[in-house]
Amino acid sequence: MERIKRKVAVPNDWSGISIRMYQDFEEIKKKNLEESDFNLEVLSAICGIEKELATQLEVNSLKKIFKTLSFLNKEMPDTKELIKRVEWKGKKYGLIPNFSEISMGEYIDIEEYCKDAGKNLHKIMSVLYRPIVKETKTRYSIEAYAPNEEKEQEYLDFPILPSVSSLSFFFRLGKILPSVLDKYLKKEREKLRKKA
């Protein structure tokens, strides 16, 4: 039997995982597959190896690949710091620089996509992160928002870490903001009472 030689891109940490890979991996985990079927599906989703080809790989090669992919068994790193700029497909992308100036279209689309954030993560990122068109050391501006399905689909290949970073930021903000707002309103009430 003739051996097939093929180079395979195997990510060695979460920085090599795209939204598509992550979504596919999450779906595979839900399937309750036998270990061998699970491994074949993971190889297909993460490394792009067709199942038929994976069954022809040498056991030692498979062991090396799965050792490299072992990071998938661990929690994704908690990026407490918001990732504002990302290098992707040879271009610099930036998170919306000023959310107080978000357009109505951006707001409506984000609201709609967040109804099923797991499924629509790539669409959310297509709104939040866009190509940087002008940049200085401390500031940048991004491409105007012009949504289209083709562009949204491209974002399936956007890296997962900045995606999780931005979602974590908004989640933490949503948890912290009510208490900060409450404290602020109490102080303002006290000021008004003292004036009265």
Image (spheres, rainbow, N blue to C red):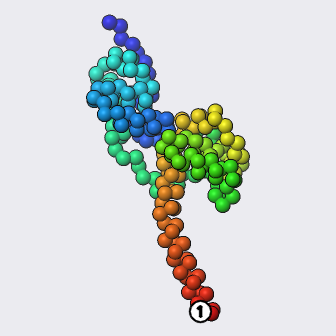
Q: Residue at x 46, y 41 (%)?
A: 15
List x then y, in percent, for residue 126.
61, 43
What residue sits right under mark 1 in the picture? 194
Judge from the rendering whether residue 31 lies leftward or rightward of residue 148; answer left or right: left
Judge from the rendering whether residue 36 lies leftward or rightward of residue 111; answer left or right: left
List x then y, in percent, for residue 178.
51, 68
Judge from the rendering whether residue 127 lies leftward or rightward of residue 186; answer left or right: right
**Count of marks overlaid on the render:** 1
Q: Residue at x 42, y 52 (%)?
A: 78
List x then y, in percent, for residue 115.
53, 48
- Whether residue 37 is visible here, answered yes or no, is yes
Relative height, residue 30 to residue 55 (above, below): below
- Whether residue 138 is visible here, answered yes or no, is no
For residue 125, what is the image quadrant? top right
Relative height, residue 47 to residue 53 (above, below): below
Could you tell me the amino acid type at mark 1?
Lys
